[in-house]
Amino acid sequence: MNTIALYPGTFDPITNGHYDIIERAKKMFDHVVVAVAVSVDKKPMFTLEERIQMAEAATAHLEGVSVVGFDNLTIELANEHNAKVLIRGLRAVSDFEYELQLGYLNNSLDDTIETVYLMPKLKHAFVSSSIVRNLLKFNGKTEHLLPPEVQKIIGSMNSCTLQ
């Protein structure tokens, strides 16, 4: 049986913590769909197309990983891709309550889809997209927080677009 997992998020931008979870999820499931949310409410720094491009670049060498953009319910997207598992990342205890509520909500919408929570390796536990965005606004060092392919894409962007 081909088990498909969906890893939804804003990925603004995709970080080493996200990448770590994707790599580990790929060892557990046959295929991982990285689902980049439009997330207008979060007012992302990068466009949906840029975030998709970064996620594709970071995961291009991983067999069995694909990237899609979406603007609908996560459960609907999971059903569109025949995914029976949702991947969610937990960095800290503070993430747990929100993620638990989200998992229960998704289960109430479709109880055939399981949510699996993965923690990034300790060295990535402090990394978040919001930390990276704050560093980028002030031209701070981000090489240690981002996959090299993502760092290259961001580095090639005009610094004016990152404000």
Image (tube, rainbow, N blue to C red):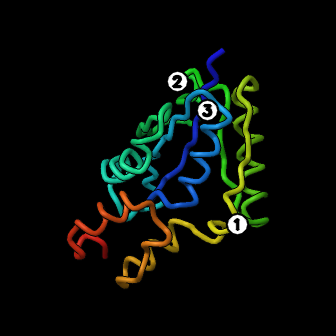
Q: Where is residue 8 in the image (x, y as percent from the top left)?
A: 55, 43
Residue 81: assigned label: 2
In the image, is residue 92 above or below residue 41? Answer: below
| Res 107 quadrant in image | top right
**Disc 2 vs disc 3: Cβ atoms closer than 8 Å?**
no
| Residue 49 falls left or right of residue 143 | left
Mark 1 secondary-structure assignment: helix
Q: Which amino acid does label 1 sit on?
A: Leu
Residue marked by disc 3: 5
Which of the image's four quarters has the N terminus?
A: top right
Q: Say which mark, if any, is on residue 10.
A: none
Hey, what amino acid is under mark 3?
Ala
**Percent position (x, y) of residue 130?**
51, 70
Q: What distance separates the C-alpha of mark 1 from that of mark 2?
A: 31 Å
Q: Mark 1 or mark 2: name the one nearer the start of the chain.
A: 2
- In front: label 1 or label 2: 1
Of residues 108 and 49, which is closer to you in this image? 49
Q: Residue at (53%, 53%) from the top-left corner?
A: 19
Does 40 appear above or below 132? Answer: above
Counting other residues with Cα less than 10 Å from the Cα at mark 2, is it few (<14), some (14-19), or many (20 or more)?
few
Give the secondary structure at mark 3: strand
In this figure, which residue is indicated by the disc labeled 1? 122
How busy is the neighbourhood of tag 1: few (under 14 within 10 Å), some, or many (20 plus)?
few
Q: Looking at the picture, which amino acid does disc 2 mark?
A: His
Q: How far, Cα to Cα, is label 3 from label 1?
A: 23 Å
